[in-house]
Amino acid sequence: MDQIDRKLLNLLQEDASRTNADLADAVGLSPSSCLRRIRRLKSTGIIDRIVAILRPAKAGRGMKALVTVELEHHGEQQTRRFLDLVTKEAAVIQAYSVSGETDVALMLHLKDMEAFDALCDPLFREGSNVARYHTMFVIRTAKETTAIPM
Amino acid sequence: MDQIDRKLLNLLQEDASRTNADLADAVGLSPSSCLRRIRRLKSTGIIDRIVAILRPAKAGRGMKALVTVELEHHGEQQTRRFLDLVTKEAAVIQAYSVSGETDVALMLHLKDMEAFDALCDPLFREGSNVARYHTMFVIRTAKETTAIPM
DNA sequence: CTTGAAAAAAAGTGCCC
DNA sequence: GGGCACTTTTTTTCAAG
């Protein structure tokens, strides 16, 4: 993991559709060496995957909400059950168990308020172990990156 | 935007390194038709970009924190100034202005607690317009996807 | 153990139907 | 949407530092 590897990771996190020849040129390496490095970065697992990122607005998910959840029963078993429940929902993009008063934090990508309403029923209804939940609707997205600068 | 386009988008959101021939086969189309569709999806803008996703733990960012911020002055101008400030920080992966008591919500990807400490100074110090902030450290990541199922 | 050049294989591209 | 010839890119091979 040297300077060149880090530069490759930065470039690939910006745009993974660049050709190997381009990347090689950008870091000043021959295509074959460059390819070997990228393969190694993939096999090492530091590169997890190559994916297409959609524009939420154009994919019919223009609405985002951040939900913090306080559970009724905080046990390991019961926290896991709730996480399993939320994880299955397509609208749940991120789900974390967190420290503090809040037990679980969720990021939701939704079509509209109706979709939010429909999602609340299965997740937060009686019997799903939720004591309280608090919703913050996203007004403006100032930054939303997948890149970790190296 | 028909059933085939949606399937292509789902496949590409899972793994964008698949070859066009593979994708064509998966949706039951000829490679040339398939390529035409993918080009259209890119030019339409529904596919925003193709990126490499790193494993945070292996990239030296094993720690995550969700921070909610209440500003002192809630004006448009002053909110924007704070967002501009946080947006510049590499550790800030997501930054939103949100509804409710909280004005801004941040997702941080950090190396360790020391990095968190170092980040708090520039962001939340006197004069940066922050009245209160509340940090939730991520204990477990139950789900963290970039995919919007179509 | 890593690099670079060139050949071979595979994939992407554009034009035609 | 499909088929085919053409171009580009990726991948392997192999010799050299």
Image: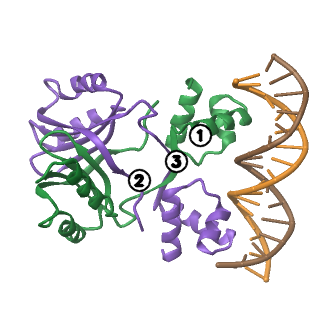
Chain colours: A green, B purple, C orange, D brown
Number of numbered tags placed on the structure image? 3
> Which chain is indicated by disc 2?
B
- For the residues bearing labels 1 and 3, Cβ distance under 8 angstroms: no
Q: In the picture provided, is A109 more to the left or to the right than B50?
A: left
The residue that appears at 13% across and 55% down in the rendered structure is A133
Q: Quick one: SS at disc 3?
A: strand
> Which chain is indicated by disc 1?
A
The residue that appears at 34% across and 64% down in the rendered structure is A90
Query: Callout 3: few (<14), some (14-19), or many (20+) C-alpha neighbours within 10 Å?
Result: some
> Label 2, label 1: how many angstroms apart (C-alpha)?
21 Å
Q: In the picture provided, is C8 more to the left or to the right than B33?
A: right
Query: Callout 1: few (<14), some (14-19), or many (20+) C-alpha neighbours within 10 Å?
Result: few
Residue highlighted by disc 3: A49
Question: Which quadrant is the C terminus of chain B positioned in?
Answer: bottom left
Residue highlighted by disc 1: A43
Query: Callout 2: few (<14), some (14-19), or many (20+) C-alpha neighbours within 10 Å?
Result: some
Question: Residue B73 at what x, y percent from top left?
Answer: 9, 38
Q: Quick one: SS at disc 2?
A: loop
> Label 1, label 3: how many angstroms apart (C-alpha)?
11 Å
- In the image, which is nearer the foreground, mark 2 or mark 1? 1
Q: Are marks 1 and 3 on the same chain?
A: yes
Question: Residue C11 at what x, y percent from top left?
Answer: 70, 57
For badge 1, the amino acid type reads Ser
For badge 3, the amino acid type reads Arg
Of callouts 1 and 3, the N-terminal one: 1
Instruction: Examine the image and state in which quarter residue A132 appears.
Output: bottom left
Q: Is residue B35 visible?
A: yes
Q: In the picture provided, is B90 more to the left or to the right than A104?
A: right
